[in-house]
Image (tube, rainbow, N blue to C red):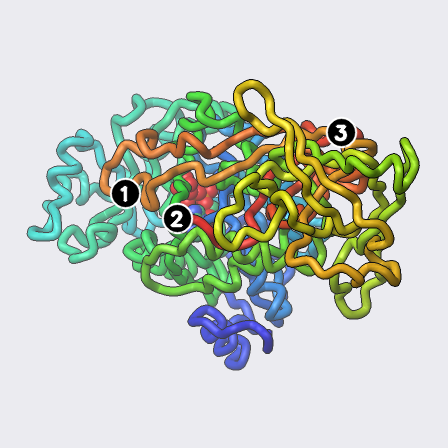
């Protein structure tokens, strides 16, 4: 990782690798009954990270940061990263989400491993596969006096937990014997108690200054059918209990999560230490580290709010190009390299901050600049008629022209074929490139002025035609003979501007979707604001323009720089060769708010 800038996580990993923190794996006594995990292959030389999404929605740009971080650290330090579906919550989970998460991770360029299985061949892990082990772990805590069944009402439990100003009050059930607790816990498991009638709690300390250590609940009763385990269980582990166990069973070394879990770390450590003492887990335990989640201006990343945008039809779907979802960004024209660059550039810190949206856009521009083929497109077309064409070139003559696909071909890459197109008597130009009465400093078309049609000829403007409303319907000009680009006469006439154009004969009409930010407020959901009230009414403008032949025959998802307009992608869904549909990915310069 010599080219990567260092950060606190890299320093920790480098330290652990140097010290051999995870070089051996030991059980206290003989491994607890059980477990296929005890015999799982141990891989001492590596670090193991994990990306553990809940399959309850589409991944977004914040998840992309976490993916790039976890998989990137594993890659850079010769380790591996696991993909684990955190499905311990029996709530409705959808294979649609599972599939989309798998796609997103792969598309970003990463692959996951399992213990004993290298990336490329491994399946993702599912946290629900550990339910049996988690249940045994709960019983082990009970047997050792470290957990108890509490039958206070939820209100009592909340009131007795205390708060920052006062210690909690022991539950009357806290002094039950292990035998009583075990029997009662089994009754919970066997469906003898109603949902909510009891919880299993870790017995730690009701006077801890950290509220999370005041005997946290670790199992609850919930009659719900789980997508993986069906109706086998009516009790489910709490996330804070399940997650450390998942990490430990998978021999994760560095468990990286967002800052809001910082206060949970003491419980994470407490639990794993107890289960190591009980012989159920091997030491050393994984370690939790926290980093600041991504906050991006003009963007919301709450899955619930993103779902609301989809469900209320504010956007066309999860993959609407204005969505900050990975599928949305992808359809917008973002590349894996741009998102990786973004993750690298914003780095990881231990304090929350806002990243400006233009940082993300800058990364896309930077990636596309050197590789997106150039092309000309006219987005607000008006016809330009070369009134002397028939005399000079011959009626209906079309003159072939060409321009390079890339102005600079990166070292070591083959030069792409040049773009071929034709010029004839009529071409499309941008409406703003003609002014009958030019404003000061205007260098484009006005009567008497000469410009170059880029890659074509020098022309001299003579005037225009207008309809009854005064709208310009055609711009008129004379071709200056023998000035074709790339011929000896090209420099014979000096001009101050070269304008983009598309031939009427070979240009193709295209639907062009001009996307802008979805919100006009930099912090659309800060401070309890109604985020829907700051939706940008101009976040999508659809125009019909004309594109040169090389663009019209693009493949879906292919990205281009439309000269002067920005970077565009042929839409994944709707683009068909010959009937082009393009999305604006990002403008050429950062012009937001300017
Ligand atoms: P949401 O709040 O959108 O529901 P989540 O954190 O509940 O997100 P998970 O599926 O649990 O969603 O997230 C998987 C991983 O992605 C977690 O490790 C989480 O820390 C990380 N993650 C989620 N959002 C962000 C973010 N904005 N920045 C960085 N990492 C994130
Ligand atoms: Mg979560
Ligand atoms: Mg969530």
The residue lying at 84 percent from left, 38 percent from top is: 389
Number of other residues with Cα within 10 Å of mark 2, as a class: few under 14, some 14 to 19, many 20 or more: few
Q: Quadrant of residue 392?
A: top right
The residue beneath circle 1 is 526
Question: Could you tell which of marks 3 and 1 lies nearer the N-terminus?
Answer: 1
Residue 555 placed where, x, y %?
77, 38
Could you say whether the residue bearing mark 2 is in a helix, strand or loop?
A: loop
**Distance Cα–Cα, label 3 vs label 1:** 41 Å
Residue 451 placed where, x, y %?
69, 51
Residue 516 placed where, x, y %?
48, 39
Q: Nearer the viewer, residue 319 or 268?
A: 319
Q: Nearer the viewer, residue 418 or 528?
A: 418
Residue 401 placed where, x, y %?
85, 48
**Distance Cα–Cα, label 3 vs label 2:** 34 Å
Q: Is residue 189 above or below residue 423?
A: above
The residue lying at 15 percent from left, 41 percent from top is: 171
The residue beneath circle 2 is 593
Q: Nearer the viewer, residue 246 or 76?
A: 76
Q: Is residue 582 above or below residue 234?
A: below
The residue beneath circle 3 is 576
Depth-wise, is mark 3 or mark 1 nearer the camera? Answer: 3
289 displayed left or right of 212: right
């Amino acid at each position: 990782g010599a080219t990567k800038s260092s950060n606190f996580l890299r320093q920790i990993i480098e330290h652990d690798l140097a010290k051999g923190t995870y070089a051996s794996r030991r059980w206290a006594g003989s491994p607890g009954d059980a477990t296929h995990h005890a015999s799982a292959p141990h891989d001492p030389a590596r670090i193991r990270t994990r990306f553990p999404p809940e399959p309850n929605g589409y991944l977004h740009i914040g998840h992309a940061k976490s993916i790039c971080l976890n998989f990137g650290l594993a890659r850079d330090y010769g380790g591996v990263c696991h993909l684990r579906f955190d499905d311990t919550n029996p709530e409705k989970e959808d294979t649609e989400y599972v599939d989309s998460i798998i796609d997103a991770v792969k598309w970003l360029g990463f692959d996951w491993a399992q213990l004993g299985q290298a990336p490329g061949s491994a399946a993702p892990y599912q946290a629900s596969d550990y339910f049996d082990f988690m249940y045994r772990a709960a019983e082990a805590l009970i047997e050792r006096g470290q957990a108890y069944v509490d039958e206070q009402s939820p209100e009592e439990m909340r009131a007795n937990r205390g708060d920052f100003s006062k210690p909690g009050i022991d539950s009357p059930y806290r002094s039950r014997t292990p035998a009583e607790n075990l029997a009662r816990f089994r009754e919970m498991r066997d469906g003898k108690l109603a949902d909510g009638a009891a919880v299993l709690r870790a017995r730690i300390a009701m006077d801890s200054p950290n509220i999370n250590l005041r005997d946290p609940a670790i199992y609850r009763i919930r009659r719900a059918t789980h997508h993986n385990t069906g109706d086998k269980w009516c009790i489910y582990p709490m996330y804070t209990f399940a997650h450390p166990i998942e990490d430990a069973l998978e021999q994760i070394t560095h468990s990286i999560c967002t800052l809001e879990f910082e206060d949970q770390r003491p419980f994470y450590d407490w639990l794993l230490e107890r289960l190591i003492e009980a012989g159920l887990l091997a030491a050393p335990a994984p370690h939790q580290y926290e980093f600041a989640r991504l906050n991006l201006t003009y963007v919301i990343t709450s899955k619930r709010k993103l779902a609301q945008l989809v469900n209320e039809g504010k956007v066309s779907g999860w993959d609407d190009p204005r969505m900050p979802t990975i599928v949305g960004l992808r359809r917008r024209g973002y590349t894996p390299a741009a998102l990786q660059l973004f993750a690298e550039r914003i780095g990881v810190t231990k304090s929350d901050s806002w990243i400006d949206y233009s940082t993300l856009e800058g990364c896309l521009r930077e990636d596309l600049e050197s590789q997106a083929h150039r092309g000309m497109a006219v987005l607000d077309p008006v016809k330009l008629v070369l009134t002397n064409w028939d005399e000079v070139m011959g009626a209906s003559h079309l003159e072939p022209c060409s321009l390079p696909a890339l102005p600079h071909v990166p070292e070591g890459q083959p030069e792409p074929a040049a773009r071929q197109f034709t010029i004839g008597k009529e071409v499309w130009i941008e409406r703003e490139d003609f002014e009958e009465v030019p404003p000061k400093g205007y260098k484009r078309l006005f009567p008497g002025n000469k410009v170059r049609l880029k890659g074509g000829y020098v022309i001299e403007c003579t005037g225009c035609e207008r309809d009854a409303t005064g709208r310009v319907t055609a711009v008129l000009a004379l071709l200056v003979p023998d000035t074709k680009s790339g011929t000896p006469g090209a420099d014979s006439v000096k001009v101050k501007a070269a304008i983009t154009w598309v031939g009427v004969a070979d240009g193709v009409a295209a639907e062009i979707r001009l996307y802008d930010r979805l919100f006009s407020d930099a912090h659309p959901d800060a401070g309890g604001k109604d985020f829907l009230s700051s939706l940008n009414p101009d976040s999508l403008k659809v125009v019909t323009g004309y594109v040169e032949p090389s663009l019209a025959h693009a493949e879906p998802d292919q990205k281009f720089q439309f000269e002067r307009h920005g970077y565009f992608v042929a839409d994944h869904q709707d683009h068909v060769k010959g009937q082009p549909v393009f999305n604006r990915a990002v403008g050429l310069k950062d012009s937001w708010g300017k």
